[in-house]
Image (cartoon, rainbow, N blue to C red):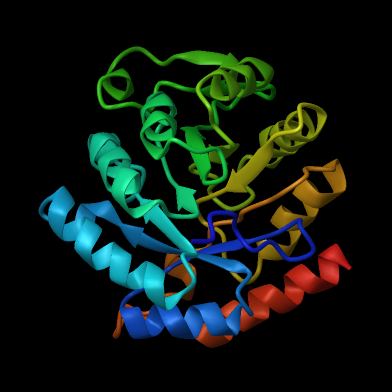
Amino acid sequence: MKLKPNYYKDRVCLNVLAGSKANAQDIYNAAQGHVLVGVLSKNYPDVESAVADMSRYARLIENALSVGLGAGDPKQSNMVSLISEQVQPQHVNQVFTGVGASRALLKQNQTVVNGLVSPTGRVGWVKISTGPLSAHAADGIVPVETAIALLKDMGGSSIKYFPMGGLKHQDEYEYVAKACAEHDFMLEPTGGIDLENFEPILEIALKAGVKQVIPHIYSSIIDSTSGDTRPQDVKTLLEITKRLVG
C-alpha cells in the first residue's frame, strides 16, 4: 500500500473532493495521479460504514485518499482518527487538537496529517483552538512558529490554513508560508480557492520556499447538479501547477 502522496516534482499535490467512486477515478486520471481525493467522514453514520466505503475508494485510486472532517467540523475529529487507523490513507484532515490521536493510531509517519489553524486578522499569529471543545472556548491565539512546533510535537505534517477566504488574508498567509519554509513544514491552504485565485495562492507558497504544498480546491470546481468535481477543472489546476513548479 502506497502511503506517501504523489507530489508533482515532489512539491505540489492537489486536494479535491469526490462525488462518487467513478468521479474519484476521473479526478485521479485528470490530475495524472498528483492528487489526494477527499471523502468526508461526515457523510457516514458510523466508523464501520465509512471504513468499508473509503477502502473501496482507496483501491480505485492507488490509496490517494484524503479522509476529511466535513467543513472542518471539530465534532468529526475522533471519527476521522478511527477511520484512518483502519484505512491507512495517504492524507488525514484534522483539527489542531486531533493530530496526536491520528498519528498514534496510524502507527506510521508516511501518511500526511494536517492540523487546522485559522487566520486571526493579525500577521504572524494563528488560532489553534479548533477542537471539539476548544472551538467553543475563548480563542487560543499563538505565534505561527509556536503552532508549527506544537504540530511537530504531536506528529503533524502540515498546517491546514482554513478558512482562507481566497486571498482575503493574503498578508497573514504570506507570513505563514514563510514560517513553514523556515521550519521545514508543509502547508495546505484551504477555503475559497477557485480557478482564478489558485495561481497566486500557490505561487506565494512556492516562492516562499515551502517544501511541499497541498492546496484544497473544493466547492468552486464541483458541478452543482451532479455533486461531482469537474475533471476538466482538475486538468486546469494541474496545468497551472506544472507551469508554476517548472
From this viewpoint, which residue is outermost toward the front? Answer: 1
In screen coordinates, is 96 left or right of 19?
Answer: right
Residue at position x 31%, y 78% in the image? 20
Residue at position x 76%, y 47% in the image? 205
Q: Nearer the viewer, residue 152 or 130?
A: 152
Residue at position x 46%, y 74% in the image? 61
Where 206 sits versus 12, above or below?
Answer: above
Report which quarter residue 97 is drawn in: top left
- Point out the image quarter for the C terminus: bottom right
Q: Nearer the viewer, residue 46 or 245?
A: 46
Residue 158: % across, % down: 60, 37
In screen coordinates, is 165 left or right of 123?
Answer: left
Residue 95: % across, % down: 40, 33
Residue at position x 34%, y 62% in the image? 39
Asked whether residue 43 is in view, the answer is no
Where 118 sits versus 200, above or below?
Answer: above
Residue 12: % across, % down: 70, 59
Report which quarter residue 151 is drawn in: top right
Residue 116: % across, % down: 47, 35
- Numbered circles on residues, count: 0
From this viewpoint, which residue is outermost toward the left? Answer: 45
Asked whether residue 203 is in view, the answer is yes
